[in-house]
Amino acid sequence: MAKELPKRSEVKEEYTWDLSAMFASKEDWEKQLETSNTMVSEIEQFEGKVTASAENLLTVLEKSAAVEEKLELAFSYAERLYDQDQKNTTHQAMAQKMYALVTDLNSRTAFVVPEILATDEAVIEQFMKEKPELELYRIQIGEIQRRKAHSLTAELEKLVAMTGEMAQVPEQVFSILSNADLVFPEITDENGEQARLSHGNFVPFEESADRRVRKEAFEKFYGVYKQFANTLAGLYNGQVKQQIFAAKARNYPSTLEAAVDSNNVPSKVYYNLVDTVNKNMDKMHRYVRLRKKCLGVDELHMYDIYTPMIADVAKKIPFEEAKETVLKALAPLGEEYVAKVKEGFENRWIDVYENEGKRSGAYSAGAYGAHPYVLLNHNDTLDNMFTLAHEMGHAMHSYYSNEKQPYIYAGYKIFVAEVASTCNEILLMEYLLANTTDKKERAYLLNHYLDSFKGTVYRQTMFAEYEMRSNKMVEDGESLTAENLCALYHELNEKYYGPDMISDPEIAYEWARIPHFYYNFYVYQYATSFSAAVAIAHEILEKGAPAVERYKEFLSGGCSKSPVELLKMVGINMEEATPIQNALNVFGEVLDEMETLV
């Protein structure tokens, strides 16, 4: 009999998140939606008159911020409920209602930005003198004016806003198909028992010391995606086409330029990353050779990429132990930081274990006015302990920004989103390395460090290159089919993993399971953030309190400066290749030590 996942109702309450910090009930949530709708009606009264006076402009900006704050909280509540069990039709309906409502309200207020843009900047400046309260909105208005060349008339802005709900369809359908509808087969585990594959246990099976288990899990898992490859290619094609529509509508030369500009990041940061990683492919190929040697295999296959290179050291790390270790590892960040993380652990910020219908993976999310929430699918592995540290880094970034910034500047840009999370991971790694004297355990930890570089810098850059090239294919008039997406992905896999890796046919279908490909050029930021975090974490460990204070200022910055300027506060310039190259040099140094140990 196969081990099946528990139903949501069977999970102990202490291991689920408590969403009452947002709303006590669905009825309270619905009242918030009604209030938001009323507030939008009040903003609509200003159509054609937004900049008729300083008073009007202030009123519109204040009301817009207030309604956005309410909607963000309501949206977060519906999404968290939906993600804890995507088979729950009530929560499905709430999430769908939220998407529809946000699209409707955005289209009804789409006149605001064009009216601000149509007003002479000198007039806006005069308004700020008349109404000092407008000074709060200076950065927000400056950001609107920065994108003037990509803004439309009020009528066209409304039309584009109305497409928002349709634009969400590829991602929504992918999520439902992948998380709720796909049925994965059973495999025979290490103990000879039948176990059903799932998103949550696929990687743990790939980490197994038993190669037969790894191979069976790999072939059967990707076999399901192969079966639905044409449908998934159609969804991804739809995603790219809606990105192209949005880019063209706003006069961008490409989807990539449109995506990075939305975060105020120069496109050369993206190209720098891909170029620098490509120039350092020798280190990745060295890593693959080392893995092949450590595993003692004649042929290294893609199902050998997750299993530890150092055998018989892996141990179960229960969730309670993982929490304690993470708290100790984060001690260099100071008592205040650690106390807040502990508060999150003790007050049900976290949804811990996998259950039937639960969204796969892990994330931190939340909204202004409530503490952050963390979704995990914890499996008691070393990797899962790092995931806990990672997601609490996100949560603390949100906590500090929400504490220090007004609502309009609290939401930090995606470009810096992975810095805090990765910094926590590196502090955890350095803590574990400093607290082991066992040569084999040290090698095991270095293996994990190498795998972090492999997974976050090389793999995410490979994803970024895939996204860049697949978008370019459609922009050049080519359709995305399962066949050409598989060919592109297989080619990249061979380039990144090198001649010592057998790029099995199944790996060509990996693109079909990656949810981040529906996030519009998101993944490159994992690699840039990891590179920045390597430098920040080492600075904190070397310089102590002054470095921690600079880092907290960065965490508290929200979007009060551009992402590139925020990172300059901690001495990192992502417009240059240097931070990427420095991080890859550390990868090379860890490789050197690992080669001497094995």
Image: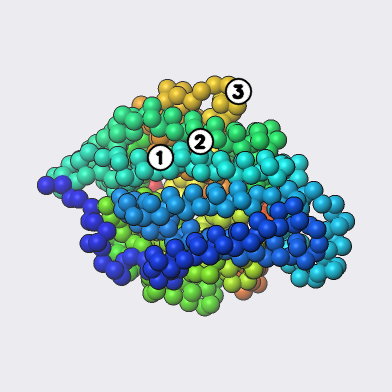
Q: Residue 174 carries which label?
A: 1
User: Which amino acid type is shown beneath numbered disc 3?
Assistant: Asp
Q: Nearer the viewer, residue 81 or 432?
A: 81
Give the residue displayed 77% in from the left and 66% down from the top.
Answer: 55
- Between marks 3 and 1 in the image, the one whose residue lies nearer the viewer: 1
Identity, as a three-letter code, of the amino acid under mark 2: Gln
* Residue nearest the viewer, comparing 290 with 103: 103
Q: Is residue 69 above or below residue 257?
A: below
Secondary structure, mark 1, is helix
Residue drawn at 72 percent across, 42 percent down:
153
Expressed as whole percent of the image width and height from the top left, the position of residue 344 reads 43, 71
Decide which of tag 2 and tag 1 comes sooner along the chain: 1
Q: Distance between the residues labelled 2 and 1?
A: 10 Å
The image quarter containing residue 154 is top right
In the displayed structure image, the side of residue 424 where residue 63 appears, left or right: right
Disc 3 vs disc 2: which is toward the camera? 2
Looking at the image, is 60 positioned above or below residue 590?
A: below
Q: In the image, is residue 341 above or below residue 582?
A: below
Q: Report if the CB atoms under discs 2 and 1 are less than 8 Å apart.
A: yes
Which of disc 1 and disc 3 is earlier in sequence? 1
Which residue was labeled with disc 2? 239
Badge 3: how crowded within 10 Å, few (<14), some, or many (20+)?
few
> What SS does tag 3 mark?
loop
Which residue is farthest front? Answer: 45
Q: How crowded is mark 1: few (under 14 residues within 10 Å), some or many (20 or more)?
A: many
Asked whether residue 236 appears in the rendered view, the answer is: yes
Q: Disc number at residue 476?
A: 3
Residue 328 x %, y %:
44, 72
Instruction: Look at 35% across and 41% down and name the residue there.
Output: 178
